[in-house]
Amino acid sequence: MIRTIIMLSLLCVSAANAKTLIHAGNLITAEDKDVLKQQTIVIDEGRIVAIQAGYQSGDASDTVIDLRDSTVMPGFMDMHVHLSMQHGGPATYLQRFTQNEADYALAAAKYAETTLLSGFTTVRNLGDGYNETVALRNAINSGRFIGPRIYTSAKSIATTGGHADPTNGFNATLSGDPGPKDGVINGPDEARKAVRQRYKDGADLIKITATGGVLSVAKNGQNPQFMVDELEAIVATAKDYEMTVAVHAHGTEGMQRAIRAGVDSIEHGTYMTEETIALMKEYGTYYVPTILAGKFVAEKSAIDGYFPALVRPKAAAIGPLIQDTFARAQAAGVKIAFGTDSGVSAHGDNGKEFGYMVEAGMAPIDAIISATKNAADLLNVSDELGTVSVGKKADIVAVEGDPLSDISLLENVQFVMKDGQVFKQ
């Protein structure tokens, strides 16, 4: 009996010490722009513990994953998604009246799994209806659901009638007077309360809609919608709670007010001027372009009835401009973090953004770095994520072939590992 117990103990120790070895034919660590050849990545308990030249054999108990014909990279990070919805035409605008919190949560769980299997191991979710991605984040972190690592803003913050006012388009009986708890503020006191409410709700960061938007049922898609004192109150309060601030913005004045207030990122940025670009460089503000969403809404605006009458001209005017804005911003040296606005376009199509970025003049390696190292920097998680580096979490993806020669390969990721666990191979 004693010998049996000892043997079982030794087997348990052996299993506990077993490592995973990835044989990478090409390795993009994203620490720099180099591509390493014939490397072995050693993973133990969900973290990278060594990167070694050549194909190492390891111990008999180790698991070896053969990616010698592939390019291996850090897990991709999408800085602008909406996991609990996916635009599907006119019916989308009725869902606010027909869907419950549970419906949104179940949809988010489905789309989260799709996103992970597309190679995106981390996402920044910028806007809920019912804080459903707070619950989903917790469920994924506890292992109950499959999906990417989620950093969520919960409900976005707007002003009355602004882009993220949840009652836009309602009749007077239904619209009521939403306040800070609902993500609608007027004045700096309510702005502070809304940030604190997001903290109470379990949000990781703050998202505000500083200008009009495309898909909201409101006439103007670019007017400024926050006063300076409101923006300053949001940023100051967010910093007290160690939260970053992401800013939906299309119009110039709204962008510039937000940048001067000290926000962390501008999303979309359609009507970005040279002065705005200079401000972003001065303040170190990240730009999250979402070209894919612009392409999607421009295409759908040509279909009669797909968008409401108020939305259609905004989609037709704003959508086609984002790729050109991105081209100017990246050429000028603005910091770029990858983001798609998926949920406007279909979840799982996130990888198409890489192609649009390269089409607009960005080098393929820089596009990959925007979705790895830069995204981690924007999230303030560079110590844990964003590169294939010793000590960091083992979030790793791979494609067959060379994405630096054919960026479209990133639309079909063949291997996905998150926290050392393989989800797709």
Image: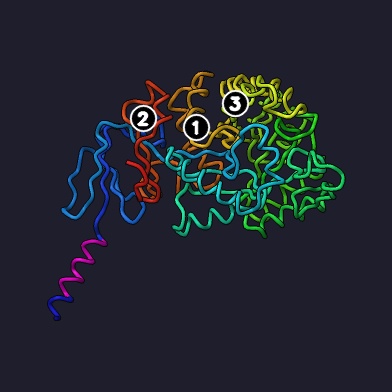
Secondary structure, mark 2, is loop
Select label 2 or label 1 by which is in front: 1
- Quarter of the figure that contains the N terminus: bottom left
Disc 1 designates what residue?
349
Q: How far apart are marks 3 and 1 (CA)?
A: 11 Å
Q: Do the residues labelled 3 and 1 touch (CB within 8 Å)?
A: no
Q: Where is residue 109 in the image (x, y as percent from the top left)?
A: 52, 49
Q: Is the magenta stretch mostly helix, strand or loop?
A: helix
Q: Please state which of residues 391 and 398 is positioned toward the viewer in this rendering.
A: 398
Disc 2 designates what residue?
34
Indicate yes or no whether the magenta region holds residue 8. yes
The magenta stretch is 6-16
Q: Where is residue 123 in the image (x, y as percent from the top left)?
A: 52, 43
Q: Please state which of residues 124 and 113 is positioned toward the viewer in this rendering.
A: 113
Say how the picture is coloured: rainbow
Amino acid type of the residue tagged 3 in the rendering: Phe
Secondary structure, mark 3, is helix
Amino acid type of the residue tagged 1 in the rendering: Asp
Disc 3 designates what residue?
296
Q: Please state which of residues 191 and 174 is positioned toward the viewer in this rendering.
A: 174
Q: Position of residue 148 (x, y in %)?
A: 47, 47
Q: Earlier in the sequence, mark 3 or mark 2?
A: 2
Residue 278 higher or lower than 174, as above or below: above
